[in-house]
Structures are given as C-alpha cells and as structure tokens.
Image (cartoon, rainbow, N blue to C red):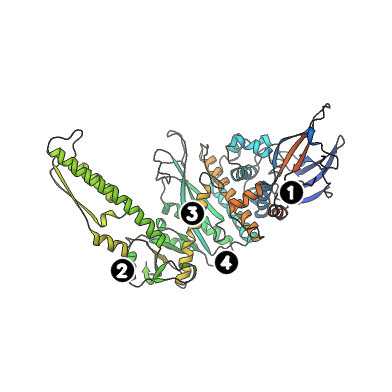
Amino acid sequence: MVWTQKALAPLDFLRFRSASCSGNNVFIFEKEVKGRRYRMAGISERVPGKEHPVSRQVCLGPVETDEPIVPSRCEVAGTRRVGDVGALLWVAERVGVLAAFEAVIARRGDGPSLGEMILAVALQRVSAPGSKSELPAFVASCVPRVSLRPAGEFSGGQFHRVTRDISEAHYDLIQQAVAQRACEEFELQTDVLAFDTTNFDTFIATDTDGKLAKRGHAKSKRSDLRIVGLALMTSGTWSIPLFHRSYPGNESDKTVLNKSLRALAHLHDSFKPASRTVVRDGGFSGDQLELDLVQSGFHSLTALPLNHTLSREALLAAVGHMRRLPGKLADIRAFRCLGELDGQKRALVVMESPELLKGQLRGMKKAKRRALQWLRQAQERLQEQRKGRLRGKRATLTSLKKKADELLRKEHLSEFLHVKLDGTETEPTLSYECDGEARRKLIRERLGKRVLVTDQVAWSTVRIARAFRSQWKVERAFRRMKRGGISPWGPSFQWTDDSIRAHTFAVVLGLQLASLVALHMNRAGIKGSTKRSLATLKKIRLEVLRERTGARGRPREILVPRRIEPHAARAAKIFELEKWGNIFPLHP
C-alpha cells in the first residue's frame, strides 16, 4: 500500500498576528530548497544597539506533496506538538501577553525577552511540566513557536538573566493589562471576585538568602521546609486568575491583602465602572480591612469568626429560625439579620451546610477518640506510677496539662470534654468527663454554620449565599497549581527571589491561558473540564516520518498528521491550528 498526501491550499505570504511578536507581523510562507518545499515562519524585529531591523526565519516542517510515501522505507522519528501549544498561543495573542510585557519592560540585549521566556515556561508548565533544563527540548518539540529564536536560547541561565531585578510593580502592571484584555475579549464576569491564599513548599537551604521563602504555616504540614505564599483573585466566570501576588511564607493573610489593596484598586479602575464584591474566607476578616476595601472601590463579603461578637449574636438569633433556600441551594438553611460594624450597617447571614456539618462531625469524632484513648492510658500510667511499678519517665502535673491542652484545642473538644488535673507536681491525679448535653448544644448552635457579613445590604439572602459559595473557585485554582494539576507550581528549583517571582507568574499565566482555552471550547459547544479540553488538544500532533532510501545526504522527513476525533478537528478550526501545518487526518 502506498500513502499519498494531498496538497494544501496556497499559504504563500499568509499574514497573521503572532502570539510571539505582539505588534509585528509573522509571515508563513513556503520555500523551495534543493527541489523540496518547506513551510517557513519569518519575522522582522528590532534589536537593541542595531540601527536596522533583523530578519529571522525558522522552518516549521516540509510541505505535504503528492509524492508517494512507501511505508516499508519509513520509520517514525518522533512527534511534534501542535494542538495544546497552538491553542494556548492563540489565547495569549488575544489577551496581549507579550504586548503587555513589551509596554512595561524593555528588551535586554540579544536573546529571548522576558515576555518570551515567561510565556515559554507557562506553556511548558501546562503541556509538559518539567525543569528549566528541559525547556529547550520542549520548545523544539512544538510546531507553533513562542519565538523565532533558536530553541537552545530558552535555557535556565537565560531565564535567570532576564528575570533579574524585575519588581512587583512591573508584574502588577503586566497582569492588570492582561486581565483587562481577557475580560474584554472573553466577556468575563467581574461583579463577584474570589480572593484567597495558599503556599508552596520549596527545598531551599536554610542559609540561602531570600525574602520570599520563609518558614510558616505550610498547607502540606511540612514544618521543615521553607514556603512561598501566593495570593490569588479569580473571576466569577470559570475561575480565571485575574490577579496574584507572591509573598513571604511567614506573612498573615490580613497583611497580604492589605499590601495588595493598591494593586487591586488599579485593577478595579482598569475595568468598566461597576460594583464589584471581593469574597474571602474568615482568615481575612478585620474591621479596618473592611474600610480599606471600601476605599479601594470594592464591596466586601466574608465569613466572620464564630467567636466574634456579631457572630455570637447572629447564631443565638438564628436558633429555631433557619429556613431552607430555594432552587439549587435547597440543601442549605439560612437566617438573615442586620448588624452594625464600625457604625456601618451590615447584612449578616447564618448559613448551615450539611456537608460542612458532616465533615466537622467526622473530625470531631476522630479527635475525641484519640483524646479518650490518651486519657485512659494516662490514668493507667498514673496508677502504675503511684504503685511504684512504672518503667520510664514519670509524668508530672505540668507535662499532663500541656498534653491535655494540646488535645482539647482540636475540633471544639474543650466545649464538652472536661479534664480535671489535681494533686502535686510529682504526684498528679487526672479525671475527665464527657458532657453529652454540651455536645448536642454545640452541634445545634455552632457546628456546620458560617456567619457571613457584607456591606451589600440590598442583596437577597440567596445572592449572598451564591456569592460566598464562589469561594470554592479560587480553591479549585489552587488545586490545579498543586502537583499533578493543570499548571503545577512545583517541583521548583528556583533559589532567588526574582526567579521565584517570575516562576510563579509563569505558573499563574499558564493556568489563566489553559482556563481561557477551556472556556472558549465550551462556549463553542465542545463541553468538558479544563483538563479534558487540554487532553483533547494534546492529541493533535504531527508524526515525523523519516524515509531511508540508502542515498547520500540527509534522509527525507515528512510531518504526517495523526487521526483525530471530530470534536478535536472542531477545536483545531476554532484555534486556527491549520496555519501551522496540515493537522487534519489523511486518507489512504
């Protein structure tokens, strides 16, 4: 059997605006070299220190011809990426990623610019997460090009050079410009924005200088590692990241949000004038912070700590008056009242979630079982100690009190599990009692409940509940940046603050581009999650067939498309992937 390839439509001097040049034009054209035709990409760009523009060209692969291919003389020499990288670059062009970099930071010397390096890293984090040493091989494996510079120039050393001495203010301006374009091009909802923080583990040595990697409260429970914090704000549509900030791992949530207010105010001004509400969890509550958010142009919606005065009053008033919400929120019961915070009227909503209650009861049961087990063992050891038959270290009143306080701090145990320590320092006594009535009162009045406070007094209870439940969107974005996610942050091998900040920017940018790709596919009728959409696009590849004829010279290589599913072919047309080559399946 002989395979033949159909000739493409003429592509000579097909102009399109490149994702890698943000203002210049890239030419896709065909070029004949020694009797064979190749598809080329060319660009004319200015280089610092040179008076005239420099022309660059790169070969995208041979052009398909009607010359027969004999399978017995061909071998598969690898594959080239087209679908996922091409779709991400298409979105990057729409939101003006490189244009935003070029408008803020000038190119430094020859080689890839800061925007090209960060965009290349962002594509790598989404398509094939790996270290910076693997970046040149990744760039070479892609038919769509971030830049027309040689793939070998996209090295880890170049990344560290171009990211040196770039301040947070520069990154803020860049992401504000990208967020504004994304909201305009993809019609993102910005009336409700979710804000939250997380942190990532690093493996930086203790004696390495740096202000970002610090020891703090790690989400992974690894107290032996230095961590880097990340604050993130997402849109109401598809949880698209709009703003982020890297911060030292030992800073509190309130401090991070307070330092971000100026950048958030500029972000608010860049959008069309409208009312916007920032949703955040209880870790960001604070009376002064509420006023600062209002001055920045944002309304506020947050969960108050249950020990707050307003929370206690609202919880007492809600007993016996909780009502189920209509529609999709029928599993939630709520109670609404008005309160006053710093002289300003606020709406208070007590929400009772069965899922939250189930999780808290499960955690409380586990903590109670461990506490009772320790208490019984402690009583037995004290009896052996009084009889003089104890082997090992003797228990003291101080050590018992320290351990008991540590156990009772977990899962509201101190509310119903009462431990009494008596006796002397060397001869302590221990007794405990579990108050069933206090436990039932705790479940009835506090467990499974949140107290929400907002200055959007005109909002209905249902709208407040729906807005707060959008908080899970930013938490989903964090899960996508953890190991095994869509755009994982780690493992990271950055050691300087500049590299860590640039690496974090690339990770968030990769998640932003991937989310916009999935959003665009869903709006076009190709339904699926972000991970499923990327999996569909990753199947669009070109196989490199190498023909061995025994003749002298370099063997002929031909890019042959794989067979793709119908919805993958639709995605290829949506993101204009045909301009990079013939990606549609061939028929024998």
Considering only order in the chain, which callout, 4 or 1, is on the residue closer to the N terminus? Answer: 1
Question: Where does label 3 land, which residue?
Answer: 475
Counting other residues with Cα less than 10 Å from the Cα at mark 1, is it few (<14), some (14-19), or many (20 or more)?
some
The answer to whether the residue labelled 2 contacts the one labelled 4, judged by CB atoms less than 8 Å apart, is no
Considering only order in the chain, which callout, 3 or 2, is on the residue closer to the N terminus? Answer: 2
Q: Position of residue 50 (x, y in %)?
A: 74, 39
Q: Amino acid at mark 1?
A: Asn
- The residue tagged with tag 1: helix, strand or loop? loop
The answer to whether the residue labelled 1 contacts the one labelled 2, judged by CB atoms less than 8 Å apart, is no
The structure residue drawn at horizontal position 84% and vertical position 27%, both measured from the top left corner, is 551
Number of marks in the rendered image: 4
User: What is the C-alpha distance between the residues marked 1 and 4?
Assistant: 32 Å
The answer to whether the residue labelled 1 contacts the one labelled 4, judged by CB atoms less than 8 Å apart, is no
Which residue is farthest front? 1
Question: Mark 1 or mark 3, which is nearer to you?
Answer: 3
**Which quarter of the figure is the N terminus placed in?**
top right
Label at residue 273: 4
Considering only order in the chain, which callout, 3 or 1, is on the residue closer to the N terminus? Answer: 1
- The residue tagged with tag 3: helix, strand or loop? helix
Counting other residues with Cα less than 10 Å from the Cα at mark 3, is it few (<14), some (14-19), or many (20 or more)?
some
